[in-house]
Image (cartoon, rainbow, N blue to C red):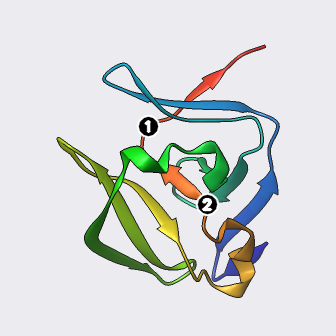
Amino acid sequence: MTATRGHRITVEPGTEHVRVVRDGLLLAESRRPLVLRETGCPVRYYLPPEDVRTELLTPSDTRTHCPFKGDASYWSLPGAADLVWVYEEPKAEVEAIKDHFCFYDTELIAH
């Protein structure tokens, strides 16, 4: 966990069944997401690269900086720019998310 001036981030192994589907195409499915909770943000699921169909994604030129997590690079699908992001060298406090993929839209499968 990291906390700075009331801003908190936690990263924990999750047991949720997470799927990412776009226009009927399964992009990712994982039963071992990392769950990132950050003050003021929705819960995000970071998926191991082995659970993502990276062959369907294309690296984008987009880069963003988060003062708490580091620099993110983005991946796209045809017709869906910057659909997913990855922290290739995250800050030490959130090192667990390194190289994991985070999609804007995920669905949780209840069991």
Residue under the image location 59 percent in, 62 percent down: 39
Q: On the image, numbered disc 1 is attached to which residue?
A: 105
The answer to which image quadrant residue 16 occupies is top right
Q: Is residue 47 visible?
A: no
Residue 90 position, x and y percent, is 60, 80
* Mark 2: amino acid: His
Q: Secondary structure at mark 1?
A: loop
The residues tagged by marks 1 and 2 sit, at their Cα atoms, a distance apart of: 15 Å
**71 versus 24 height, above or below:** below
* Mark 1: amino acid: Asp
- Foreground pick, 37 / 53: 53
Q: On the image, numbered disc 2 is attached to which residue?
A: 100
Q: Secondary structure at mark 2?
A: loop
Residue 35 position, x and y percent, is 71, 50
Give the side of residue 1 with respect to residue 5, left or right.
right
CB-based contact (under 8 Å), mark 1 and mark 2:
no
Q: Residue furthest top?
A: 111
Q: Is residue 4 visible?
A: yes
Point out the tag, 1 or 2, that comes first from the N-terminus. 2
Q: Residue furthest front?
A: 55
Give the side of residue 103 with respect to residue 57, left or right.
right
Residue 1 position, x and y percent, is 79, 72
Given this view, does label 1 or label 2 mark the residue nearer the observer? 2
